Amino acid sequence: MSAGYKGDVGVRQCWSTLAETPDAVLVDVRTVPEWTYVGIPELSSLGKAPVLMEWQSFPSMTVDPHFAETLAKRIAESGGNQSSPIFFLCRSGVRSMASAAALTAAGYENCFNVLDGFEGPLDETGHRGSRGGWKAEGLPWVQR
């Protein structure tokens, strides 16, 4: 276990596990504006949908004090449980580490951070989305 959660995985490993494991859940912990303007993972081909749950609420960027409790209910609604693989995704991998640790502390056994997140690291011109992460790896996504 690293940093208070089960471990880090790449976006391809996350996708494979979501495809092969019926109770695996993807939790996108970015903010409403990010989901709206940047996009969200598209899991319909897997018969799933991501759980959209802000770790920090925009614009204050304060951590939701009821995050783990609320998320536990949403995971159950998605068919997951405390032993299911739960993958946490944010823009680049920082908020997802903190949220994975919070749900692990709440008793979930298999919480993973998705490395490089949805948009990946900055490239040499200061832009995201081309060097790593969900979008750069060509995994399905949509804008709402």
Image: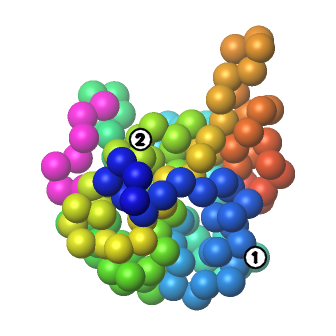
Q: Residue furthest left?
A: 65
Counting residues from the start of the chain, the first of labels 2 and 1 encountered is: 1
Q: Which residue is mark 2?
A: 95
Q: Secondary structure at mark 2?
A: helix
Which numbered disc, 2 or 1, marks the residue closer to the eye? 2
Q: Can you give x and y, in whole percent of width and height, for residue 113 in the image?
A: 50, 53
In this picture, which residue range is highlighted in magenta?
A: 61-67
Q: Which residue is mark 1?
A: 45
Q: Can you give x and y, in whole percent of width and height, for residue 18 in the image?
A: 63, 74
- How crowded is the residue under tag 2: few (<14 C-alpha within 10 Å), some, or many (20+)? many
Q: CA distance from mark 2 to mark 1?
A: 26 Å
Q: What's the residue at 30%, 62% (across, down)? A: 103
Q: Secondary structure at mark 1?
A: helix
- Residue 13 lies left or right of residue 67; in this view the side is right
Circle 2: residue type:
Arg
| Vertical order, 82 against 123 (above or below) | below
Which of the 4 image quadrants contains residue 95?
Answer: top left
Magenta span contains residue 63? yes
